[in-house]
Image (tube, rainbow, N blue to C red):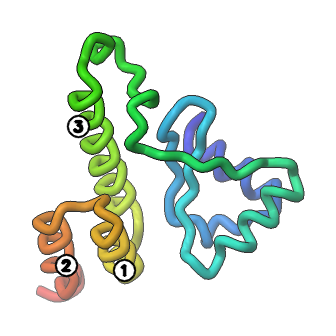
Amino acid sequence: MPIGQMRACLRRFGIDNSQILDILYPARQTIGVLVHNDFVATLLEKFRAVNIQQVEFDPLDTKHIYDPKYKDATDDEKLQVAQELRFNRAKRALNHIRAPIKYAVARDFYSKGWLHLAELKTLLATKWSHPDVA
């Protein structure tokens, strides 16, 4: 389902889209919703009201590597692929989050090991540039 349609669904459930920083599909039948810490309880309450269950999801579990080209890969190789997918998801999410929130999210991603230090430094180096300033 495209992100726009998912946002429309969430809106029908009474979820304010301005509280959603990002939506992703990390595995089959799994939707990840990135929200500010202050909105987690509200989001989970609204999900429970419409019978949507929260699941524990480990993005590094190799069972989520569905690409047939990794069918014969070792567990270590699949783990490396899973780590790269997680890093790519984090970077993609940051591309869609507006400043200044993206900087706080980037630091949080780095603290969780979801973003490399070099990428964090690159992102934070752009913090003070403003498109209206020549």
Amino acid identity at mark 1 = Ala
Front one among 83 and 130: 83
Q: Give above or below for 67 relative to 121.
A: above
Q: Is residue 85 left or right of residue 49?
A: left
| Label 3 or label 2, whichever comes before in sequence order | 3
Q: Which residue position is annotated with label 1?
A: 104
Asked if marks 3 and 2 touch (Cβ < 8 Å), the reply is no
Point out the frontmost of discs 3 and 2.
3
Q: Position of residue 71 (x, y in %)?
A: 32, 12
The residue lying at 34 percent from left, 47 percent from top is 86
Q: Which residue position is annotated with label 3?
A: 80
Around disc 1, counting alpha carbons within 10 Å, would you say few (fewer than 14), some (14 to 19), or many (20 or more)?
Answer: few
Rendering quarter of residue 11: bottom right
Instruction: Identify the secondary structure beneath mark 3.
Output: helix
Real-space CA distance between mark 2 and mark 1, rounded to the nearest whole angstrom: 10 Å
The residue lying at 56 percent from left, 68 percent from top is 35
Asked if marks 1 and 3 touch (Cβ < 8 Å), the reply is no
Q: Position of residue 121 (x, y in %)?
A: 13, 74
Q: Which mark is residue 124?
A: 2
Amino acid identity at mark 2 = Leu
Front one among 131 and 91: 91
The residue lying at 29 percent from left, 62 percent from top is 113
Real-space CA distance between mark 1 and mark 3, rounded to the nearest whole angstrom: 26 Å
Q: Is residue 58 left or right of residue 35?
A: left
The residue lying at 36 percent from left, 49 percent from top is 89
Around disc 2, counting alpha carbons within 10 Å, would you say few (fewer than 14), some (14 to 19), or many (20 or more)?
Answer: some
Instruction: Identify the secondary structure beneath mark 2.
Output: helix
